[in-house]
Image (cartoon, helix red, strand yellow):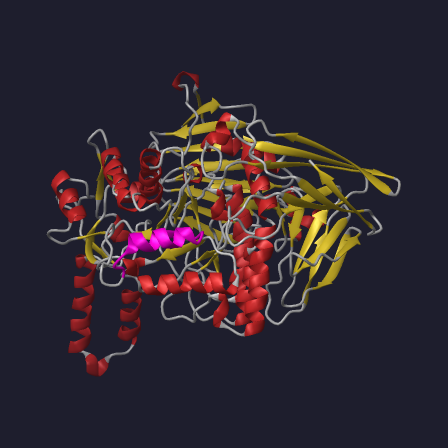
Amino acid sequence: MFKKMQISNMTTLYKSGTPFNTGAVIVDMDNNNFEQVSNVTFFTIEEGSNEISFIYEMAKDDVVYGLGETLGALNKRGKRYRFYATDDPEHTPEKESLYGSHPFMILDGEKTFGIFIDYPSEIIFDIGFTHKDILKITIFSKDFDLYIFDCDEKLTIIKEYFNLTGKPYIPPKWAFGYQQSRWSYFSEKEVREVANKYRELGIPLDVIYTDIDYMDSYKVFTINKETFPNYEGMVKDLKEKGIKVIPILDPGVKIEEGYEVYEEGKKNGYFCVDKDGKPFVTAVWPGLTHFPDFLNSKVRKWWGQKYKVFTDMGIKGFWNDMNEPSIFYTPKSLDKLFDLLKDLEKNKEELGIEVFLAKESFAKISNNREDYRSFYHKLDDGTLINHDLVHNLYGFKNTQATADEMKELLPNQRTLLLSRSSYPGLHRIASIWMGDNKSWWEHILVNIRMLQSLNMMGFFYTGADIGGFGADASAELVVRWMELGAFTPFFRNHTALNTRPQEPWQFDEESLNIMRDIVRLRYAFLPYTYSEYMNSVKDSNPFVKPISFVFENPRSKDIEDQYMYGESLMVAPVYEQNKKGRYVHLPQVKWLNWTASKYEERKMKVYEPGDYYIKADLSEIPLFIKENSLIVLSEPMNFVGEKDITELTVAGLVTDHALYNYYDDDGTTYNFVKGDFGTIKIDVTKERNDFKIAIKKDDKNNMLKIKTIHFEIYDSDGSVVKKDMLI
């Protein structure tokens, strides 16, 4: 039934049938090394006419991690998950699927192992939902690759997964700065006003996004010359203020004679086709559109070259949206609704349940599976394949088109590249945000959990729309969400059309001042964030981790609302309405608590392991530095790279010995691959009532401009020793 190959000591491939080459896995396979087997380690197998299920009986205390962009708890038990990418803006708890497909999970318990299924269409993970103790994975095909990671250590399983699929994407350093967006800033004038307001109020900012209304009639690769008469000049002027402009781009190409992208795609056969071989017609923002056939390399090349209109302006960041692909309707589905309306009109005097059923029909017109089964891709070898069979790859291949051409358009330049839809492998070339959340307190907790799960998938650089995308946000909610966002890699405030604006000045003066301090705190942490991020990529070790991945005590497995941010810092955000603090679990070691509000104010307290209620007023976020660990801070700037960092502050709790490896590079190129980076090895040893500090700088290319390091080192009693050292 299966062909089996041992990839490494811990990783085994089970190949069923003839899988589609998704591009997720980067390891070359030797087809001569397979052996025929009829079973799969850990699982029993059920086979149907065109499906296979893998079944595992879970022990009572088994915990399941992973699955990336899914709703629900960090421990995935008790829910059903469906991997079939969909544009669903209603992220309510019962939803089984979102924009991405990430079929990689870790079972941690009596037996510990990982599983990755490389299959680009529908997969169901029923993890104790139908039966509370049964894990059942159903693949609706007999052509797939299944990888088993047989290892007792969760972080090692993740490393094995990265060995298969590649190391995470590295954005430019400025991408770790604060970012502002809204659907929509309707004019160049409005964008400039937002940028100026940030600078006038002294709130750091690195990026402003332009959503779909900068386009001419929502046509991709165009600009509305009436509302944005000098888009290129705007980009240049904001760049001088240290603010980068990032445009949104959608894959739907408007059907309009004379529109260059449409005419070229039609002439060259670059669009997906229907059963008759004609360009498939659907509708998104511009109205009737065609979808580019991104599974074809020629189409990807053509599409990627179109970004030149923006790179020529100096733009180095792009936001690929709607690429599940989202379908508002098709002419065929619309005709069915019109027929339904006619029937309702005929019988309007006697309508009852028919109105309810009609409402359901309208709700199902968007992103209908029948529509996805109605079009085809033409592969490089000329083979036609139904879209439904490769559905989950569309966003990956759309973004691959962008990433590949950036190597030509912006050689040796890092770009900020976001995609909404994703599949394993996309994490090598770009990242994702968490989609159209809501301004609900419950979605802050969703943000915290999904941040941890996505890091397991390799999406280190990720985050949610701060303040929530849909619905109206209160000042308190935005403040608390910004406190969380300050400790997520992607830190963007974004909200929807016809919702309450969420820029920091849109509320009261107290909230404005708090938000300014939060953003400044974020910039103070940038040396730590960037150094830890780069070290995490190098080590194939998630940048954001559940505390149960670091501490093996049973209590840690219950903690889903705290996380490790790098190796030294644990973050415990307040995420409930009207709360003036929260309970925190401090596992196994001592912790140095900094309930932070301003960079300049650092009141620290040492806690023994245990459970505590930590007070945190609206302006405060509870942070905890692990025993014998250090963090690195600098004076906040208005934008990343505004000036050289010449001074660092190192803080930590040292009861014995702490070692920190500070890393930095130019932040914009890939020269670090050739060794063009600098490090400072900071070694702190406790000696009676003092600390011995050793500093070793390795900076052959003079990357680092640091001249002074200020030390604030605490002992187990909370006493602090402060020292300044020149380097």
- Give the image location of residue 558, x and y in percent: 65, 52
The quarter of the picture where the N terminus appears is: top left
Nearest the viewer among 230 and 684 is 230
Q: Residue at x 49, y 69 (%)?
A: 505
The region drawn magenta spans 228-247
The quarter of the picture where the C terminus appears is: top right
Q: Residue at x 59, y 41 (%)?
A: 532
78 left or right, relative to 275 = right
241 drawn magenta:
yes
679 drawn magenta:
no
- Give the image location of residue 292, x and y in percent: 23, 44
Query: Up-down: is 580 above or below 695?
Result: below
- Give the image location of residue 302, x and y in percent: 23, 38
Q: Residue at x 28, y 40 (%)?
A: 304
Query: Is residue 183 visible to us here?
Result: no
- Give the image location of residue 544, x and y in percent: 58, 45
